[in-house]
Image: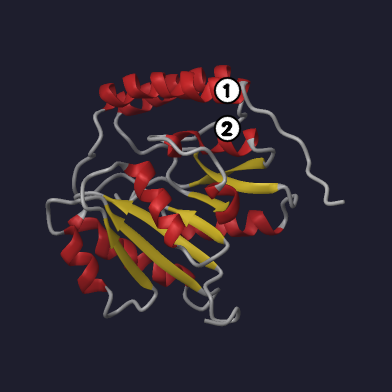
Amino acid sequence: MSDDTLPELSVVVPVHDEADNVGPLIDEIAATLRGRLRFEMIFVDDASRDGTRQQLLAAKSAHPELRVFAHASQSGQSTAVRNGVKQARAPWIATLDGDGQNDPADILRLLAERERADPRTRCFAGWRVARRDGWVKRVTSRFANALRARLLRDQTPDTGCGLKLFEREAFLDLPYFDHMHRYLPALFQRAGWTVVSVPVGHRPRTRGASKYGTLGRAWVGLADLRGVAWLIRRSKRTELHRL
């Protein structure tokens, strides 16, 4: 495949039991990006138990840009994102959650921000300025964001938004661990790159149910937060010059 036929952007979407959402989401992504740039859609099915995989395969006939991969066993969102990025053929990646709450049209906002950003900016993080979740999730997310900002000092108001745009090579150079997708801005900054937060929309979930318990996610997040803080403290970075 020549350079002028390779995709310029790979949209990576991890999904688990989202049979009612994947079809409309694929249609929206295609409607947003077709005619604007060369792109591909990579959906990674994290061992769904409903009809998600069948819906994805059925959509391939109408969407030649769609590529579908599946985990043999459920491995989590971070692993699905990383495996999707590894399969991507474009130098830049956009990620979306599979529940339809991220608006694919906001990918264009991130791309526009990239055009005017400093070259050392390798991650553009969506910032959900008006959350459309229940009050419990909003309160716990507000607390988690405040704690994370205090410990990591990543200057990012919303790291939990699934809508992000980043350079593939820089992402694959980050340390990998389960749940790393929640700490991407801090990890990019640890690697020496700049991160920009971009205000984006947020939509209520209209189909299906959340796959992650709020309390359980909070306890896991505290353990991860300590680990990321340790990584940042132990990092050592310098420029390499060819002689």
The three-letter code of the residue at mark 2 reads Ala
Spatial separation of the CA atoms under disc 2 and disc 1 = 7 Å
The three-letter code of the residue at mark 1 reads Leu
Residue located 34% across and 69% down the image: 67
Which residue matches tag 2?
186
Pointers 2 and 1 in contact (C-beta within 8 Å): yes
Q: In screen coordinates, is 74 left or right of 158?
A: left
Residue 74 in sight here: yes
Q: In the image, is residue 233 above or below residue 238?
A: above
User: Between disc 2 and disc 1, whose residue precedes?
Assistant: 1
Give me the disc on residue 152.
1
Q: Position of residue 80 (x, y in %)?
A: 35, 49
Q: Position of residue 159 (x, y in %)?
A: 49, 35
Q: In the image, is residue 28 above or below residue 154?
A: below
Q: In the image, is residue 187 above or below residue 22?
A: above
Q: In screen coordinates, is 152 left or right of 71?
A: right
